[in-house]
Amino acid sequence: MRRVRDLAKPATIGEQGELFPVWRYHPFFTDNPAPTFQTEREHRHHAVVEQVIEDSKVEAFAHLPSAHFHPNSAWLTLWT
């Protein structure tokens, strides 16, 4: 198990900050022998890809205009 610092941005000027600034950690388990930084970067990339897939299911795939392949292919090409 590795503990990795959360890369959330701190409050900007004009916003209310935390009373006691602390780092938030989240664990992830891996059998990858790569360095922690590389493993975390890969983990975050996978999370972004999963979010893109989820967004496409909610937006473009949910509103396919036709029951035929070619119009749907054009629709998805225009969406991306």
Image: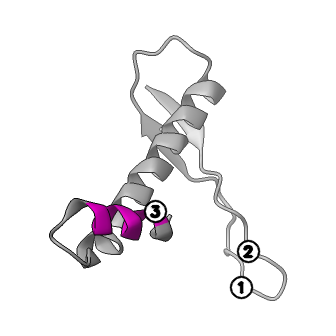
Residue 28: where, in percent of width, then height? Answer: 42, 34
Q: Could you tell me the amino acid type at mark 2? A: Ala
Residue in the picture at 23% in, 60% down: 69
Q: Which residue is mark 3?
A: 77
Lower sequence index among marks 1 and 3: 1
Which residues are drawn in magenta?
Answer: 70-77
**Relative to 23, does residue 79 appear above or below in the rendering?**
below
In terms of secondary structure, where does tag 3 sit? helix
Residue 16, disc = 1
Q: Give the CA distance from mark 1 to mark 3.
A: 42 Å
The extreme bottom residue here reads 14
Q: Which residue is mark 2?
A: 11
Residue 78: where, in percent of width, then height? Answer: 48, 69
In terms of secondary structure, where does tag 1 sit? loop
Q: Quadrant of the N terminus?
A: top left
Lower sequence index among marks 1 and 2: 2
Magenta residues: mostly which secondary structure? Answer: helix
Q: Quadrant of residue 39?
A: top right
Q: Check contact, mark 1 vs mark 2: CB within 8 A.
A: yes
Residue 57: where, in percent of width, then height? Answer: 29, 65
Q: Could you tell me the amino acid type at mark 3? A: Thr
**Relative to 43, does residue 66 appear above or below in the rendering?**
below
Residue in the picture at 39% in, 66% down: 74
Q: Check contact, mark 1 vs mark 3: CB within 8 A.
A: no
